Amino acid sequence: MKYLLPILLVLTLVSVSCSNKQTKQTQVSTETSLAEDRDKENKAFRRQTFEKFINTEDSIIESGEKAYQVVLDCVEDENGEGEKEKEKYQVWYRENVAHIDSLSRYCIELSDKGNEEELLKILAAELGNFQSHPIATTYVCFDLNIILTNLYFSQADQYPDYLQKCIDLWELNRVQINAVQAGWQEYHPQYMEVLKILLHLYESVNNSQKVAEIQGLINEATAQIE
């Protein structure tokens, strides 16, 4: 994985939050240099992620649209919705692709300018629309969660419930990954990473029941992998 630092940073952040310990820095220049490197890496990771939503190929959109059509057919069967409602949702799908294309460009602009406060507000509000985009695989959703988690931790003073917000993000990602790997003979490549992040988050909020549950899943997966 090219941009490993943002992912490692998430694990570091939640671990530090759990321990509530602070390390004294003896060399200010070194600390500044590390912060600058981390900032550059985060911006590069965000750009790489948001660029995936820009200029999406027609074949990918059409493939996603077919899958969306299947969902619409199921909804219609259950709720008896008419053709007009069905057409409305079909139009929304294409409009959302165009909307996220434009929004991704704006998010890159905000990130490059260092406007993380506005970036967090937009990404948190529009996450559902990003996840509805045809290129939003479990891998892309994972990357979006990395971005959001880093942003929440960097602005923790403005979000008292930031840890719970992060937990909700990663629990949803776990559901997405479980749905994908249900028919597989092996674990999803990001399954263990998601579990480890959740483990640290639950430790941070002192939820011993969830810590035991997640640790059990990690132990089970580790035993099967080995």
Image (tube, rainbow, N blue to C red):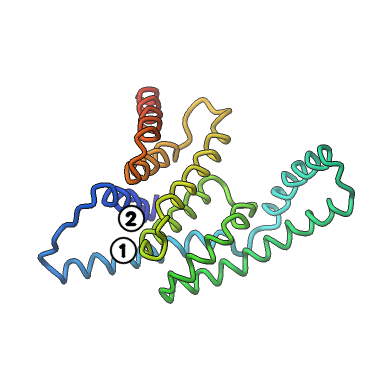
Q: Which residue shows up at 51% across the image and 44% down it?
A: 173
Residue 68 placed where, x, y %?
A: 73, 47
Classify mark 2: helix, strand or loop: helix
On the image, the x and y values in percent for residue 115 come to 44, 74
- Determine the image quadrant of residue 205: top left
Count of numbered badges drawn on the protein: 2
Q: Tag on residue 38?
A: 1
Q: Do the numbered discs 2 and 1 sit on residues whose CB atoms are within 8 Å?
A: yes
Dividing the picture into quadrants, the one containing residue 92 is: bottom right
The label shown at residue 76 is none
Give 121 or 10, whichever is nearer the viewer.
121
In front of the other: 186 or 205: 205
Task: Classify residue 67 as left or right of residue 53.
Answer: right
Q: Give the residue number, with chain letter if any, for mark 2.
A: 5
Q: Which residue is drawn at 19% across and 57% down?
A: 22
What's under tag 1, amino acid-wise?
Arg
Residue furthest toward the bottom?
A: 113
- Secondary structure of the residue carrying tag 1 is helix
Nearest to the observer: residue 44 or residue 15:
15
Front residue of 123/45: it is 123
Residue 206, placed above or below residue 16: above
Name which of mark 2 and mark 1 comes first in the sequence: 2
Q: How crowded is mark 1: few (under 14 residues within 10 Å), some or many (20 or more)?
A: some
Q: In this view, does 178 lie to the left or right of 203?
A: right
